[in-house]
């Protein structure tokens, strides 16, 4: 689902779109929210209504990893990356671990 597809979906499914809008955190920038909203919309059909909290948690894991560099277990990151496949986040920050920084410093 591209950003154009997301906009089309939102226009055609106002009730779902309005529900999803309630999931936006007040701290989320427009860029952050648009990416996380796309994650939620792409994966909503794979979760039952009583599993919605789980989907929202996974969307936060993905967004925290992409936008803030938070680290999680390998299995969890693999899962959310699969769920987010095809979502394009322009100008996403690039994070390096301490070990990566130290290794590059030693090479000087």
Image: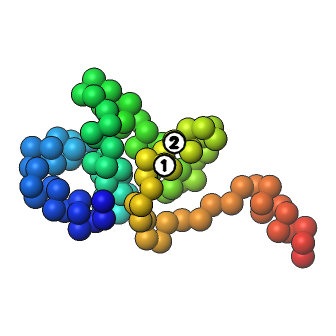
**Are there few (<14), some (14-19), or many (20+) residues within 10 Å of tag 1?**
few
Vertically, is 28 above or below 55?
below
Task: State left or right for residue 82 relative to residue 103.
Answer: left
Secondary structure category for the residue under label 1: helix
Task: State left or right for residue 48 relative to residue 99.
Answer: left
Q: Residue at x 85, y 68 (%)?
A: 105
Rendering coords of residue 31 (x, y %): 35, 63
**Are there few (<14), some (14-19), or many (20+) residues within 10 Å of tag 2?**
few
Task: State left or right for residue 74 relative to residue 27.
Answer: right
Q: Which mark is residue 7?
A: none
In the image as oriented, which residue stretches furthest toward the bottom? 108
Secondary structure category for the residue under label 2: helix
Q: Quadrant of residue 78?
A: top right
Q: Of residues 64 and 75, which is closer to you in this image?
A: 75
User: Can residue 62 be seen in this snapshot?
Assistant: no
Residue denoted by label 1: 82
Rendering coords of residue 23 (x, y %): 26, 41
Q: Of residues 57 and 25, which is closer to you in this image?
A: 57
In the image as oriented, which residue stretches furthest toward the top? 50
User: Can residue 41 be seen in this snapshot?
Assistant: yes
Q: Residue at x 48, y 45 (%)?
A: 80
Rendering coords of residue 43 (x, y %): 33, 44
Residue denoted by label 2: 79
Task: State left or right for residue 99 relative to residue 53.
Answer: right
């Amino acid at each position: 689902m591209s950003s154009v597809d997301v906009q089309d979906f939102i226009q055609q499914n106002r009730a779902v779109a309005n529900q999803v809008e309630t999931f936006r955190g007040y701290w989320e920038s427009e860029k952050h929210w648009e990416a996380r909203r796309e994650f939620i919309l792409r994966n909503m059909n794979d979760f039952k209504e009583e599993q919605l909290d789980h989907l929202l948690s996974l969307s936060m894991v993905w967004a925290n990893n992409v936008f803030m560099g938070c680290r999680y277990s390998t299995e969890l990151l693999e899962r959310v990356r699969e769920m987010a496949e095809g979502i394009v986040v322009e100008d996403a920050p690039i994070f390096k671990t301490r070990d990566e920084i130290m290794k590059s410093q030693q090479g000087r």
